[in-house]
Image (spheres, grey):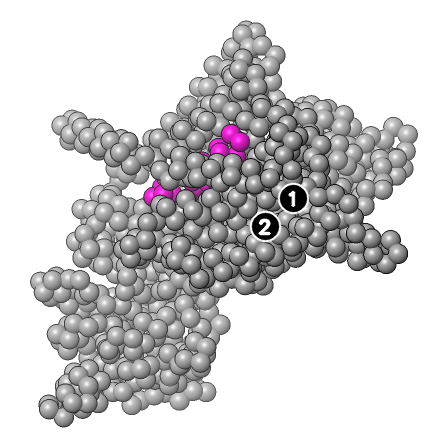
Amino acid sequence: MKFLAYLVSGISLGSIYAIIALGYTMVYGIAKMLNFAHGDVIMVGGYISFLAATNLGLPALLSVLVAMVFCTVLGIVIEGLAYRPLRSAPSLAVLITAIGVSYFLQNAALLIFGANPKAYTPVVSGTLKLFDGQLSISYVSIVTVVCCIVIMLALTAFTGKTKMGKAMRACSEDKGAAQLMGINVNRTISLTFAIGSALAAVAGALLCSFSPTLMPTTGSMPGIKAFTAAVFGGIGSIPGAFIGGILLGVIEALGRAYISTQLSNSIVFAVLIIILLVRPAGLLGKRTQEKV
Amino acid sequence: MSDSKKRRPGLESVSPVVPVQTTYYVPERDVDKSPILQCINLGISFGGLKAVEDFNLTLGRTEIAGLIGPNGAGKTTIFNLLTKVYQPTHGTILLDGKDTANMSTAQVNRAGIARTFQNIRLFHNQTVADNVLIGLHNEMNYGMLGGILRLPGYWRAEKIARQRAMEYLALFHLDQHADELAGSLPYGAQRRLEIARALATNPSLLLLDEPAAGMNPSETAELMENIVKIRDTFHIAILLIEHDMSLVMNICEGIAVLNFGRLIAKGNADAIRNDPTVVEAYLGRKGAKES
Amino acid sequence: MNMKRYLKDARSDLLTYAGVIIAFLIISTLKSHGALNRSQSGLLVPICCYIVMAVSLNLTVGILGDLSLGHAGFMSVGAFSGVVTAMSLMNVIPSAPARLALAMLVGAVCAAIVGFLVGIPVLRLNGDYLAIVTLAFGEIIKELITCLIVGVDSEGLHVIFNVNGSKTANDLTLLDGGRIIIKGAQGATGTKTIASFTAGFILIMITLVIVQNLIRSRHGRAIMAVRDNRIAADSVGIPVTKYKMMAFVTSASLAGAAGALFGLNYSNLAAAKFDFNTSILVLVFVVLGGLGNIWGSIIATVILYILPEALRGFANYRMLIYAIVLIVVMLTTNNPVLKNYIASLRSKFSKDSEKEASAS
């Protein structure tokens, strides 16, 4: 029964990783950059929904919506101001800029909200008791898992069926060719950042409901782990990000429970390394070989 | 690193296990010597697709040979097999009688095969001289510590290497561009530099992948002279892939024709020119009938 | 003859050495005359460490062309192995400089070993996959060191690997007169600080000799060939993995030596100090200084390390300003219009100097 409880907490933690990873994998797929600021957008999402709920007294769902709108705008602004001018620059320049944006968001949050952690009120409260109360599952966990599945299905449908989604895939494959086919590359990339940031906001609210301390650095580790999850599943692949996220969460929860709390991140990263050695393009990724 | 430097001349170096393929034309001067290269039933399949099948080829020590065929016939794939960019799924490659089965690309080079690439692969951000010096890498023998502490061996080897680099460059009229970045050279010069770099590795077999691509007729004519000159100067075998038929017919002593991954003909220029299967491969069945 | 460029290379190497020596002489004169306040002279050793970190990371990122986000991990290995060496040999080797030198050597060797082990899987990957795995290794090293409890007494070293957090320093069962060196998450405590600015200067000089001479040797050219075109490098007989490993391990060992010096500069030092933020800090130095540009790494490290200190007057705004400076510098240096302008200036300048050279 204990195992089941760990498993459930792992799956819901994994669902949060998966939601972030879904956004991350799309952004990476199209912009081909390690967006270190992505984790900090999660943090911003957390703060905005926190403010909307406590200061404006909005209901939980509405506060998350406000955070989504805010982060969408933030994502578009970041992309337009910091990343778009560097589209033809070397990838390291973009990486350093992303690090700059990450520092900026963290320190802006530090100035505005202070270093003290905020006690976040979960978006949904209460727990579901099963097996005569032996196994309790919080409603947050259920909401998280449901959210994650819905988002994954919606994104799959969006990229597979809609015109914008196809444009997105075309851009991630070959920007030049996409442009020749009449696709507005800049707008497509903006849209991708918008979607990724909106997802980050959702993830921020859920993450803070899950572990209710909110600090300016809250987002950075989950951001990195979500990228790990995306690599795990095969970067650019939507089902891959989903599977990668869930697996990561489960490994982390079980590792923490059964092996070592101190080494929980190490266990996650060790599994990542092993997976990349066996399958260098991740679980569901396609390996491309350079033509000679 | 020392395993592969020795070149073994003479007939005794032919592996007794594998019979020598004698069906292929070998220039008279090479007949009494062992072949430099033997491909025996060489093949590779990607998934289910057989890209190259049953490829047999024997090259004389100082032979210039051509590998021709329509686009997608598998010519470059054969180069990639010979240099171990791809591991063959079937067959054997004997270089100077020695099986290359367990060698890596770098080891094959040290054993004596150097190559150029269809889409030029220079070290674009390095100077022309440094490109050749990188080719001379294994010709120098000082260790990492010797390089860092700049022991006498470092200075000696670097001095000789620099001189030799300039000699290779002079051979291809590139010496006055020695300090320029390789990427800034015009196209034809880049192709020549690639050949110079390959020669610097002291090969016994040089593979040229479409050396005349993108060259004008006068450049091609110069290239032809150069190829013969390389053979005469360094006494090495040259196998080249080329679409320029005048080049192939003029300088290649033996020609192998590839279509859909299979050898369809081999022989000297006259034999190939009159071979109906070759004409069919290039012009289609109708063309074959008309000719 | 193509001697001109070699002379130019040799001259720029010598200028780098000269620049470092002059800076050292000026700063030590200032220091001996009491012109530096406590916080200023406290920056000297860390700056030296970070210069070595940046130059060594430049070997991996700039010269080898592989993005490493775990460089602080090697620094950490060097720091803690160096601290353990120096602290446990306190009675055996009374001379502090000798102990420091030995500690740095041990730090370098330990980091080189870890670098080799990490390199086996890492160097099989490319690009961002490689980057994320180096980051992963950096975090793993950090967490593993967090689990270490080390003490020394007359019987020798006592080491506990505290996997589930249940052990404390008392479990070392040290004899009387024993000393605790590393206390788990608290890191090294009670370290006798023997690091000195002179040692930092010597380490920088050694690093420069190693890195600059390596770049100008056949091995360095092979490493750069691998960076520029792996397939072509392979085709001219350069064993790619060997040279990737050579650059990676050299870089790790220099970071280890820097870590040992760093560790012996503080009486208390936690493993959490060497997290990926530190790796990224060093990476920023390298990129802003220019990939493959050794002198640039040194200058960028000095400026960017001092910048937050200089901005102390702005209190809470300083990191915000730092972030903005970072973004603005990246946007302007990569602006195509500005880039062309600088390139045209440079070509004009070099033509002028060529004319001078031919006239003389």
Residue A160: name its quadrant: bottom left
Q: Quadrant of the C terminus of chain A?
A: bottom left
Q: State whether the magenta stretch is mostly helix, strand or loop.
A: helix
Residue C77 pos. (x, y %): 65, 40
Label 1: chain letter: A
Farthest residue to the bottom: give it.
B289
Which quarter of the figure has residue A64? Answer: top right
**Residue at 15% in and 68% down:** B224
Which amino acid, by three-letter code, is at mark 1?
Leu
Judged left or right of residue B113, residue C32 is: right
> Residue A206 bears which disc, if any?
1
* Range covered by the magenta-colored residues: A87-105
Which amino acid is tagged 2? Ile
Q: Nearer the viewer, residue C16 or C266?
A: C266
Q: Which mark is residue B106?
A: none
> Badge 2: few (under 14), some or many (20 or more) residues near its Cα, within 10 Å?
many
The image quarter in which residue C1 lies: top left
Residue at 32%, 84% (x, y): give it.
Answer: B262
Q: Would you name the residue on which mark 2 appears?
A: A19
**Residue C266 drawn at (x, y percent):** 68, 24
Chain under disc 2: A
Q: Residue at x 61, y 32 (%)?
A: A52
Going from N to C along the chain, the mark reached first, 1 or 2, is 2
The residue under the point 59% across, 44% down is A202
Report x, y in % for residue B249. Answer: 15, 78
Q: Viewer-proximal residue, C19 or C56?
A: C56
- A257 part of magenta stretch: no
Distance between mark 1 and mark 2 Cα atoms: 10 Å
Q: Secondary structure at mark 1?
A: helix
Residue placed farthest to the left in the image? B218
Residue A100 within the magenta-colored segment of the rendering: yes
Say whether marks 1 and 2 touch (CB < 8 Å): yes
